[in-house]
Image (tube, helix red, strand yellow):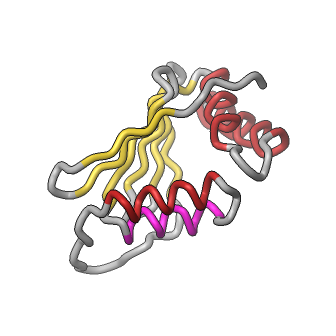
Amino acid sequence: MTTAITTLHAALQRAAAIRPAVGGFPYLAETLRQAGITRCRMAVPSNAMLYLSAAGPVAVQGEPLVTGTVGVPPFDREALIAALRADQGGRTTFPEFVAGCWKAGVVWYDVDLIARTCTYYGADGDHYVETYPPVDV
């Protein structure tokens, strides 16, 4: 196992132990940032996350949301915001959140852990940017 993988696993375990059920994302993000991870990029249809750090990139492959050839839903900003608020309110699991992103036409999203922003992209270049607050962990 590489240093980057070991560091990521440790950060994810620490975040799981300290993050609250409601409004927990900033705690996860800060824990990752403190571990030296600068960005997280999610390819939504394939449910693949890429973590970028000075120690090296790490890919985590989840269960794909789609297989084969499928049409991409149109970008729906309001549906995306509804999925975000449900997740932030502790009403969805992470897999449900990712599925909500896909249904809202999000094909990938990028979390900048330094700037504290999440940018969600549709297939046609539409995007939505949301900031998240700093927290102490």
Viewer-closest of 85 and 41 = 85
Q: Is residue 111 above or below residue 48?
A: above
The spot of residue 124 in percent (x, y) is 15, 55
Total labels drawn:
0
Left or right of 20 on screen, residue 55? left
Residue placed at 24% from the left, 79% from the top? 70
Find the magenta span and give its range: 93-103
The secondary structure that dominates the magenta segment is helix
What residue is at 23 percent from the left and 68 percent from the top?
Answer: 74
Residue ID at (45%, 32%): 117
Q: Please determine whether, in this image, residue 76 is positioned above or below residue 15.
A: below
Q: Nearer the viewer, residue 26 or 31?
A: 26
Farthest right residue in view: 17
Q: Quadrant of the N terminus?
A: top right
Left or right: residue 5 compared with residue 16: left
Q: Quadrant of the C terminus?
A: top right
Q: Is residue 96 magenta?
A: yes
| Residue 30, percent from left and from top | 65, 28
16 magenta-colored:
no
Figure quadrant of residue 129: top left
Q: Tell me where residue 127 appears, x and y as whole percent.
A: 27, 47
